Image (cartoon, rainbow, N blue to C red):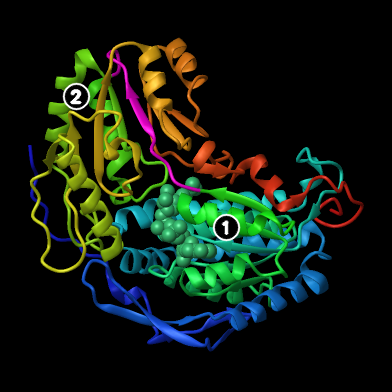
Amino acid sequence: MRFEYAPAPESRSVVTLRDSYGLFIGGEFTAGSSAFKTISPATEEVLAEVAHAAPEDVDRAVAAARQAYERTWSAMPGRERGKYLFRIARVIQERARELAVLETMDNGKPIRESRDVDVPLAAAHFFYHAGWADKLGYAGFGPSPRPLGVVGQVIPWNFPLLMLAWKIAPALACGNTVVLKPAETTPLTALLFAEICQQAGLPPGVVNIVTGDGATGQALVGHPGIDKVAFTGSTDVGRQIARACAVSGKRLTLELGGKAANVIFDDAPVDQAVEGIVNGIFFNQGHVCCAGSRLLVQENIADEVMSSLKRRMATLRLGDPLDKNTDVGAINSRAQLDRITELASSGDLEGAQRWSAPCPLPGRGFWFPPTVFTGVSQAHRIAREEIFGPVLSVLTFRTPAEAVEKANNTPYGLSAGVWTEKGSLILWVASRLRAGVVWANTFNRFDPASPFGGYKESGFGREGGRHGLEGYLDVLAGGDVLAGGDV
Ligand code: NAD
């Protein structure tokens, strides 16, 4: 059954957009060397002009972070640092609606997701790490683990505020200061976060935000004043950064791409599994590193699953991301839309069968309908390459061993899903999957207490949980001062 819904647009008036934004350095907004425009991917309207940080601007930001590290932050007892993180978390909650609307305007994701997932999880990351700041001595890294110093962080556009929280909260809790570069298509919530740092009274220079494109990112990760680089983004850029950091002595963590298998066994409750498949690949338009983009279905239930899945996909509502009824929003950029279109065409050319949900696409903006390919073989590009869009590739298997072999047949290793009623089968499969996260009878669940990260070309290092602290602590030094041993 398909229900008709009256439009329920969220108000844009909760957001005060400025015409132009500067760089956030040393606790203040300052002019950059040049500027670029950020647009709404749903309407292509220009939202604001944003400063582009040149290498000399990155220099200033790193110098401010170093000064704050040496003079204030690293010397501050963990219990005091924790209070700032807690305050930031509270302000994120207080300004949640404003953050959610701004995120949706700049990114194109449905307001339902930015409101119910991105922003609450961002606050949760700060709350969680506020709790660690004065307990680092009990985290399993020695009695007084030390911070690393100044951290350079580069993040992608798919979860702009949430990726910022994943990066900044643990870094600050451990006593480091940061220079963060948001993605060029989604800088606005990072700049609003800069205001939140001011509002929370965070000492100047502890958090610095430099906006710009890949060249700014390159200047940041290659800067000699950086002690650690934390990168989330594509595997190609991750490789370049790994090469740049290899001879520098900098610490590095990489959160890269994925091509997750979502494995459905024949005893799984089909309706529930179909919801999991839809959530796995169409959440956030499939712009999710851990998206369940390869569906592995046991052969004897493949027809039943496919007809249920198509029925469910036909009910997805695509359109205005600010409408509270919308399930599928806009593709984040023209470049990403071109990439999705090209990869989907390769599926046609290589002989897979395409089916798209019958939803009309708006005339302006960047859109791609929820799409599923059947008849996919493991050699097809759509089974091997990360599409990073609302496109699902379906393969079948007969035995658990075949499912595991196919699921692991990828250069990536970020996440996977298993659907079955048998606990023993879940454990058997999960222990054989080479993936950092394995969800059982659910998908795309996140919690700040749970470490997240990849194997193989999905990167290394973990974010979240006790394990995530390790990337921001000098765990080998076993030193005698700082970072929360001093409660
Ligand atoms: P991208 O690699 O093109 O860009 C990511 C960031 O790196 C952007 O801020 C960009 O400006 C910057 N950048 C580009 N070139 C750079 C360079 N040479 N040096 C330094 N910085 C540079 O990725 P994207 O298209 O923005 O994001 C999508 C990718 O991110 C996907 O592959 C996705 O899987 C991955 N991702 C991974 C995770 C994870 O946790 N593993 C989470 C979200 C996204």
| Closer to us: 306 or 3 | 306
Tell me where residue 287 appears, x and y as whole percent. Answer: 34, 51
Q: Is residue 47 above or below residue 460?
A: below
From this viewpoint, which residue is outermost toward the right? 480
Which of the 4 quarters of the picture holds residue 139? top right
Give the mark toward the camera: 1 or 2.
1
Q: Is residue 212 magenta?
A: no
Q: Is residue 310 left or right of residue 235?
A: left
* Label 1 near ligand 1 (CB < 8 Å): yes
For the point 54% across and 66% down, the residue is 91
Crowding around mark 1 (Cα neighbors within 10 Å: few <14, some 14 to 19, many 20+) is: many
Q: Is residue 179 left or right of residue 122?
A: right
Tell me where residue 141 appears, x and y as whole percent. Answer: 79, 41
Q: Main secondary structure of the magenta part?
A: loop
Q: Secondary structure at mark 2?
A: helix
For the point 40% across and 68% down, the residue is 186
**Disc 1 target residue:** 241
Of the residues shown, which amino acid type is indicated by label 2? Val
Crowding around mark 2 (Cα neighbors within 10 Å: few <14, some 14 to 19, many 20+) is: many
For the point 35% across and 44% down, the residue is 386
Q: Secondary structure at mark 1?
A: helix
Which residues are the magenta region?
256-268
Of the residues shown, which amino acid type is indicated by label 1? Ile
Instruction: Note whether residue 108 is visible.
Output: no
Which of the 4 quarters of the picture holds residue 18? bottom left
**Disc 2 target residue:** 305
| Closer to us: 270 or 262 | 262
